Each structure stands twice: as C-alpha cells, then as structure tokens.
Amino acid sequence: MINEDIVVDIAREVLWCIIKCSAPMLLVSLIIGLVISVFQTVTSIQEQTLTFVPKLLGIFIVLILTGGWIANNVVELFQNLCAMFPEYVG
C-alpha cells in the first residue's frame, strides 16, 4: 500500500521538475515584458498588445535552445517513477 510519504515525495519531485523546466521560459517572458514596459513608459505608448509578439518569439527561441534539456528532465523523472513502481505497488 502506498503511504503518504511516498505520495508527498512523488508530488515534490514532479513539482520540482515542472518548476525547473518552466523557469527558462518564464524568466525570458518576464525580462521581455519588463523591457517593453519600460519602453512603453518612456515613449508614452500604451498599446497592450505590443508585448505579445516579442514574448512569443522569445519563448519560442528559448524552447528551441532548451527543448532537449527539458525533454531529458521529463524522461529522467518518468524513468525514476517507472523504476520505483514495484516499490510503490508492493
């Protein structure tokens, strides 16, 4: 039977993997948004859709650059969960 400690450990590992894999894209989006916000403040341009395309391109580039690393992290997590499956069931 699975006890609460195992469930908490699995949830912790999964959440850490999600944070680790999403951090590069979130940081790039944050930086691009901040730069464009400062630019809008300086130039008095108040267009809300101005940040959409740069953020989209930035996230796409980061995804291309870090996609292999993200896939490796997810595969490693899945392999660890599969390797521990007999312990979880038994």
Image (cartoon, grey):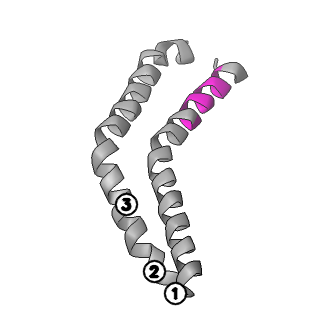
Q: Which mark is residue 13?
A: none
Mark closest to the chain's N terminus, 2 or 3: 2
Query: Circle 3 is placed at which residue position?
Result: 58
Query: Circle 2 is placed at which residue position?
Result: 50
Indicate the amino acid at tag 3: Gly
x, y percentage for residue 11? 61, 32
Determine contact: label 1, label 2, CB under 8 Å. yes
Q: Is 55 in front, or is 80?
A: 55
Q: What's the magenta region?
A: 6-15
Determine contact: label 3, label 1, CB under 8 Å. no
Query: Residue at the location (39% across, 69% down)?
Result: 54
Determine contact: label 2, label 3, CB under 8 Å. no
x, y percentage for residue 24? 45, 46
Element at label 2: helix
Q: Residues within 10 Å of mark 1 (few under 14, many from 20)?
A: few
Query: Circle 1 is placed at which residue position?
Result: 47
The answer to whether 78 is drawn above or below residue 83 in the figure is below
Q: Is 77 in front, or is 47?
A: 47
In the picture, measured across the screen, residue 74 lies left or right of residue 5, that is left
Query: Residue at the location (44% across, 20% down)?
Result: 80
